[in-house]
Amino acid sequence: MGERWVVNASPLIVLARIGRDSLLSALADQVAVPRVVAQEIQAGPKDAAQQALAAGRFAIIDAPPPPTEILAWDLGAGETAVLSFASAEPGWTAILDDESARKCARSLGVDLKGTLGIILLAKQKGLIASAAQELRALRAIGFRIDDHIARDALNRAVGETW
């Protein structure tokens, strides 16, 4: 079975802002965006993420009602929808950057990746020339990542330096 990803707003927005939202479809066989996440993106400022949604590049899905185990984490509506869907649908990976949502996913045994993981995977698959260059582009548009985490991930996963 191929990769199936359900994506939250922040990874889609930041990847779109650096012109790399196509990596989602290039790396996963199916990419879904919960309706509440799509609405959150469309309510924001006009940007490339809105254009990607309007172009129909990602399936818009309805997430099931969240179980109490997810509600107890008091996450945002988007994170809750992503985790509700991924926990109810075996084989789907949650694409999240929010640390609390990532902790929730781990506690539920939900597979997860974040923007950093997508960039590293894209480098491993030969879809981008340099993961470090893409992380620098992400930082330039305001994406926050700890230098130590970036340096360690780049070195371990793709042999690049920060």
Image (cartoon, rainbow, N blue to C red):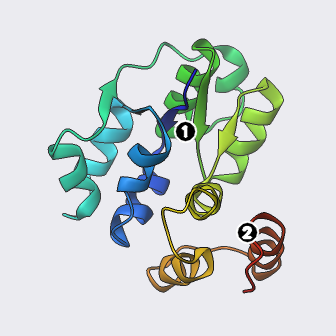
Q: Is residue 121 left or right of residue 53?
A: right
How far across and down, in percent of the image, does residue 16 sit?
Answer: 34, 62
From the viewer's perspective, is residue 8 above or below residue 111?
A: below
Q: Which residue bears the numbered disc 1? A: 79
Q: Is residue 119 left or right of residue 36?
A: right
Mark 2 lies on a secondary structure that is helix
Depth order, front residue of 97/70: 97
Q: Is residue 54 left or right of residue 158?
A: left
Task: Identify the residue at horizontal 55%, vertical 83% (top origin).
Answer: 133
Instruction: Tell me the number on the disc at residue 91.
Output: none
State whether residue 16 is above or below residue 6: below
N-terminal label among 2 and 1: 1
Q: Is residue 138 left or right of residue 75?
A: left
Spot occupied by residue 34 in the image (x, y as percentages of width and height): 39, 30
Mark 2, mark 1: which one is toward the viewer?
Answer: 2
User: Which quadrant holds residue 120?
Assistant: bottom right
Task: Kindly state the secondary structure of the residue where label 1 is placed.
Answer: helix
Residue found 47% across the figure and 38% down from its top: 78
Q: Residues within 10 Å of mark 2 (few under 14, many from 20)?
A: some
Residue where numbered disc 2 is placed = 158
Q: Amino acid at mark 1?
A: Glu
Which quadrant would the C terminus be assigned to in this image? bottom right
Please state, as top left, top right, bottom left or bottom right, where the N terminus lies in the image: top right
Q: Residue furthest front?
A: 126
Q: Position of residue 32 (x, y in %)?
A: 40, 31
Image location of residue 119, percent across then percent down: 57, 63
Q: Residues within 10 Å of mark 1 (few under 14, many from 20)?
A: many
Task: Name the residue rendered at 65%, 56% in the picture.
Answer: 117
